[in-house]
Image (cartoon, rainbow, N blue to C red):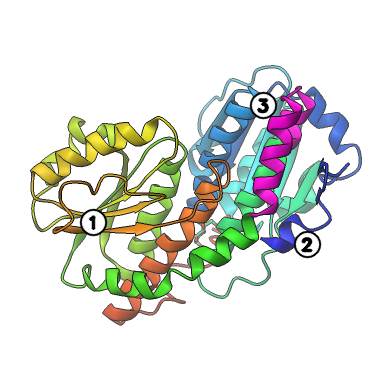
């Protein structure tokens, strides 16, 4: 993540033309974005939607690439097509980008880790994530570096659209702090090893998030599925009562990723619903969120978010560590999960 930000985020904000020659001019014309990606990269796109809509007030659509090209997407004027891909060779993402060229977008932007990849070569603008080689099949540093790159995009768009200067400076300072905040999150590892034990006898787990932490819950559930083979699903916590609550009993671990701001109170009341049904709550939170009244059953892991803007990238790390340690304890191959390929090129 430090490499992703280096020479791109200066003391006064995002540096000029980090998206390529003419990039700033093109971004200044953008009136909306369509983000298309697969798997983990799709979850990064969902986080970017929250950021760009909140800070730049631009509408953002996010879609899995495997669906995008098989439907007639409506493309409003001056929409930017954004492809996110670690490998830059994922067949669905590449095909979606090629299809986008027939659909009248303002231009295409690739957020990618491999400079010589097809997605990068064919895009008008590009921002390399500089994650280095991904050894494992399941994306981990690919995701956090994609978030860092997308945060730069959100800041640039917001700045161009007149975001208040103090707020812009505050968000830039948070982003500059992200590498350090991730180091602090990595230091939670011993506590996470202890948490992982709770999942060993389990076959299922629910992940809950709210706001920008909902895509982080999706990513946490995906990591657990991919490398430990525990069936995990993620929901926005407010959706619990619309179905998934029926699954909750004392054998269901429920992992909650607490948001900052007013949504925290909303999450707490959602967690009461889980507690009332005997579910085992495992809460990742900045403070005491959701654990008041019942510390006996469940666990609280305190994460220093470094601020609401960078919180999704920071909270991802303990969830990745959780999936990793559950997989190690269950004896699965964390680098090469069964049935999966690093790059899905067909
Ligand atoms: C997309 C992806 C990864 C996942 C796995 C299969 O790849 O779904 O997120 O971890 O490796 O492919 P990419 O387009 O980001 O390379």
The chief SS type of the magenta part is helix
Q: Nearer the viewer, mark 3 or mark 1?
A: 3
Disc with the residue nearer the chain's start (3 vs 2): 3
Q: Which one is in front, 35 or 183?
A: 183
Based on the displayed image, in which of its 4 quarters is residue 155 positioned? top right
Structural distance between the alpha carbons of marks 3 and 2:
31 Å
For residue 9, above or below residue 70: below
Q: Residues within 10 Å of mark 1 (few under 14, many from 20)?
A: many
Q: Quadrant of the C terminus?
A: bottom right
Rendered image: mark on residue 116: 2
Can residue 175 be seen from the camera position used here? yes
The question of residue 173 being in magenta is answered with: yes
- Whether residue 85 is visible here, answered yes or no, is no
Q: Residue at x 38, y 80 (%)?
A: 333
Residue 270: percent from left, percent from top: 23, 36
Residue 43 numbered mark, or none: none
Q: Which residues are magenta?
A: 156-177
Secondary structure state at the residue bearing disc 3: helix
Q: CA distance from mark 1 to mark 2?
A: 39 Å
Residue 126: image location, x then y, percent: 77, 47
Label ID, residue 56: 3
- Residue reaching furthest top? 77
Question: Which residue does the numbered mark 1 point to in the structure image?
Answer: 205
| Mark whose residue sits in front, 3 or 2 | 3
User: Which is closer to the viewer, label 1 or label 2?
Assistant: 1
Q: Are marks 3 and 2 in contact (CB under 8 Å)?
A: no
Q: Secondary structure at mark 1?
A: strand
- Per the model, the C-alpha gap separating discs 3 and 1 is 35 Å
In depth, the one of 144 and 11 nearer the eye is 11
Point out the tag, 1 or 2, that comes first from the N-terminus.
2
From the viewer's perspective, is residue 288 above or below residue 135? Answer: above
């Amino acid at each position: 993540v430090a490499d992703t930000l280096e020479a791109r985020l200066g003391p006064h904000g995002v540096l000029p033309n980090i998206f390529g020659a003419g990039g700033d001019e093109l971004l200044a014309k953008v009136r909306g974005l369509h983000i298309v990606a697969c798997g983990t990269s799709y979850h990064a796109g969902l986080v970017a939607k929250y950021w760009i809509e909140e800070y730049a007030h631009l509408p953002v659509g996010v879609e899995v690439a495997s669906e995008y090209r098989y439907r007639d997407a409506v493309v409003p004027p001056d929409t930017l097509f954004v492809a996110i891909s670690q490998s830059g060779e994922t067949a669905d993402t590449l095909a979606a980008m090629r299809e986008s060229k027939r659909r009248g977008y303002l231009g295409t932007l690739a957020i990618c880790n491999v400079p010589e990849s097809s997605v990068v070569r064919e895009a008008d603008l590009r921002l390399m994530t500089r994650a280095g080689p991904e050894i494992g099949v399941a994306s981990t540093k690919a995701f956090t570096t994609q978030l860092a790159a997308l945060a730069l995009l959100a800041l640039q768009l917001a700045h161009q659209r007149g975001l208040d200067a103090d707020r812009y400076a505050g968000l830039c300072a948070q982003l500059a702090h992200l590498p350090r905040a991730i180091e602090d999150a990595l230091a939670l590892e011993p506590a996470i090893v202890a948490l992982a034990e709770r999942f060993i006898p389990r076959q299922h787990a629910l992940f809950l998030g709210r706001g920008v932490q909902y895509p982080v819950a999706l990513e946490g559930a995906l990591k657990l599925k991919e490398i430990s083979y525990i069936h995990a699903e993620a929901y926005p916590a407010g959706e619990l009562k619309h179905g998934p609550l029926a699954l909750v009993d004392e054998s269901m671990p429920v992992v909650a990723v607490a948001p900052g701001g007013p949504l925290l109170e909303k999450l707490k009341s959602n967690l009461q619903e889980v507690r009332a049904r005997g579910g085992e709550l495992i809460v990742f939170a900045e403070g005491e969120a959701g654990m008041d009244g019942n510390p006996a059953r469940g666990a609280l892991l305190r994460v220093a978010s470094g601020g609401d803007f960078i919180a999704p990238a920071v909270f991802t790390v303990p969830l990745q560590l959780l999936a990793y340690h559950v997989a190690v304890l269950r004896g699965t191959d964390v680098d090469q999960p069964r049935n999966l390929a690093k790059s899905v090129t067909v």
